[in-house]
Image: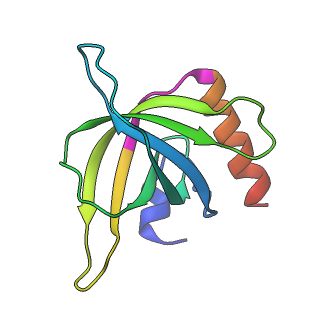
């Protein structure tokens, strides 16, 4: 087991998922949704691919489509890290989930257990 996996609170799901996000607005304003792919997902956060850099610390409204689950998972997330490798067209953006219902957290943990068997 590598050091990173020893530090993780939740198991990773290393599969591709579709995620929609938009900047969270406290004043009730609604921006447009961006659709991106997720390389790495857990009950604690995600690693998304996006064509633009996002500001570290910004808060996002997120909707995740999960196979075999009727309703998408909705939550708030905070941008923790942005990586843009040299000559890359896509940024890799790490987000941590701030508000994830216990029901949705359990769905993610169950999915991780099934996929990682």
Question: Residue reaching furthest top?
Answer: 27
When the figure is inspected, residue 37 is found, relative to residue 29, above or below; the finding is below
Which quadrant of the figure has residue 78? top left
How far across and down, in percent of the image, does residue 25 sit? Answer: 27, 23
How far across and down, in percent of the image, does residue 114 sit? Answer: 79, 52
Q: Residue at the location (28% across, 45% down)?
A: 79
How far across and down, in percent of the image, does residue 6 sit? Answer: 48, 59
For the record, the magenta segment spans 96-102
Q: Residue at the location (55% across, 41% down)?
A: 43
When the figure is inspected, residue 43 is found, relative to residue 28, above or below; the finding is below
Which quadrant of the figure has residue 26? top left
Q: Residue at the location (73% across, 41% down)?
A: 110
Q: Nearer the viewer, residue 44 or 87?
A: 87
Q: Is residue 79 magenta?
A: no
Q: Residue at the location (52% across, 59% down)?
A: 37
Q: Nearer the viewer, residue 103 or 9?
A: 103
- 39 sits left or right of 67 in the view: left
- 108 sits left or right of 57 in the view: right
- 8 sits left or right of 83 in the view: right
Q: Nearer the viewer, residue 104 or 9?
A: 104
When the figure is inspected, residue 111 is found, relative to residue 74, above or below; the finding is below
Q: Nearer the viewer, residue 94 or 7?
A: 94
Q: Is residue 99 magenta?
A: yes
């Amino acid at each position: 087991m590598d050091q990173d996996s020893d530090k993780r609170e939740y198991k990773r799901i290393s599969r591709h998922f579709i995620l929609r996000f938009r900047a969270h607005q406290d004043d009730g304003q609604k921006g447009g949704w961006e659709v991106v792919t997720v390389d790495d997902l857990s009950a604690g956060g995600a690693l998304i691919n996006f064509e633009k850099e996002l500001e570290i610390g910004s808060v996002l409204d997120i909707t995740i489509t999960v196979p075999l689950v009727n309703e998408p998972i909705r939550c708030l997330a905070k941008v923790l890290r942005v990586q843009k490798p040299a000559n890359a067209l896509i940024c890799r953006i790490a987000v941590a989930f701030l508000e994830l219902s216990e029901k949705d957290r359990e769905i993610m943990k169950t999915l991780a257990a099934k996929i990682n068997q």
